[in-house]
Image (cartoon, rainbow, N blue to C red):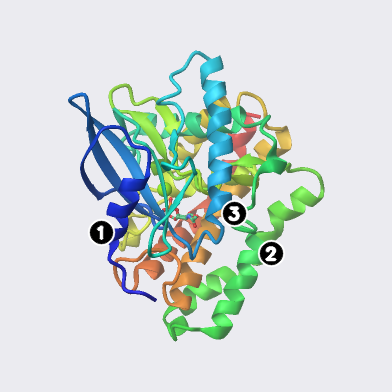
Amino acid sequence: MRKVDKTAGVVEAVKNFNFWGDYVDFRPFGNGHINDTYMVRFRFEGKIRKYILQRINRTVFKKPEEVMSNIIGVTAFLREEVIKNGGDPERETINVIKTKDKKGYYIDGYGDVWRAMVYVVDAISLDLPEDNNDFYQSAVAFGTFQRQLASYPAETLFETIPNFHNTPVRFENFLKSLEKNASGRAENALKEIEFVKAREEFTHVLEDANQKGLLPKRVTHNDTKMNNVMLDKDTREPVCVVDLDTIMPGYSVNDFGDSIRFGASTAAEDEKDLNKVHFDIGLFETYTRGFLKGCGGILTEEEIMLLPEGAKMMTLECGMRFLTDYIDGDTYFKTAYPEHNLVRCRTQFKLVEEMEAQWDEMKKIVAKYK
Ligand code: GN1
Ligand code: MG
């Protein structure tokens, strides 16, 4: 791998996008696990304008042109939806900035791929909800996103990461990594490995429901962490949904589930003290209410009844992905220390266990809203 001078690439990229005004500065931004994100500031007519500039992770996204094609298509569609509803299209959807030669991305001298967008002003992104209302509003945002895109032609979307939320395929990949044990660290995670193996049967539940015609493929976001919603800094109401890299055909219940995995936990995804990590069923109900309100009746009764499966599936799958990456030697997710992925997988499995213990309760809650 080449030694990266991260700064040189940013400076070159900054010069090649159609930003407005005079360049002021840039700085690293956000908590994403995949891409490198920067905030770039310009001054135009005495005012500061902020942009987001990102180096797309090429290990994860093999075809960045397809990622950008999806994002440009979906955001143009959302823009029209927002305008139709009398909203503010500068804030209520991402606005992609093209390069000076009108392309969706820029390739720098190192071969790195960059894209840029307008920074959403007066909005915040939270890693954990500060109160129930924050979480409720994020649910409304992702539900609304689902509804707004219900008539988007899903067949025009590229599958930017094949089998992204195909949990049985993820399970197969986990077994292959285990077999290889590239990091030699599998023996540090025997309990966690058994935990996953014991749930193989469950990994098939959603794919089976789809086969039986009970779970349709829709346009989904696929990375519905709380920190991928921008909330207005004053009203705390949703402004827009961000991080659109993984928009692909998928299951609504997985979009729901990934939010539960991340936001209905009492602790961070990488909390080391498992005594602090709990599945909060009150937050589960809050999110269910908000998500279904946002969806505005587009989900079928069968889909609604599968929301708990979505929650458990995304939590198990994400834990399995962290564990797989630990065994592979940290090749996918950004890590801050050697055991980071192992710590992350443990929080996910703790949540799965607590969901299993409250399964009937979860089913009762969703039944109230169908
Ligand atoms: C990654 O990029 P970021 O941090 O929003 C990952 C998600 C995981 C998440 C775990 C493209 O999301 O699938 O659920 O980390 N994105 C990709 O925090 O793999
Ligand atoms: Mg993100």
Q: Residue at x 38, y 65 (%)?
A: 110
Of mark 3 and mark 1, the one earlier in the sequence is 1
Up/down of 290 relative to 209, above or below:
above
Marking on residue 7: 1
Amino acid under label 3? Thr
Say what secondary structure mark 1 lies in: helix
Of residues 3 and 170, the one nearer the viewer is 3
Of mark 2 and mark 3, the one earlier in the sequence is 3
Q: Residue at x 45, y 34 (%)?
A: 94
Marking on residue 360: none
Q: Position of residue 43 (x, y in %)?
A: 21, 32
Q: Quadrant of the C terminus?
A: top right
**Quarter holding residue 205:** bottom right
Say what secondary structure mark 2 lies in: helix
Cα–Cα span, label 3 and label 1: 27 Å
Is there any visible trace of residue 113 in the rendered image? yes
Q: Nearer the viewer, mark 2 or mark 3?
A: 3
Residue under label 2, please give it. Answer: 201
Q: Position of residue 267 (x, y in %)?
A: 34, 51
Q: Position of residue 172 (x, y in %)?
A: 64, 71
Residue under label 3, please give it. Answer: 160
Of mark 1 and mark 2, the one earlier in the sequence is 1
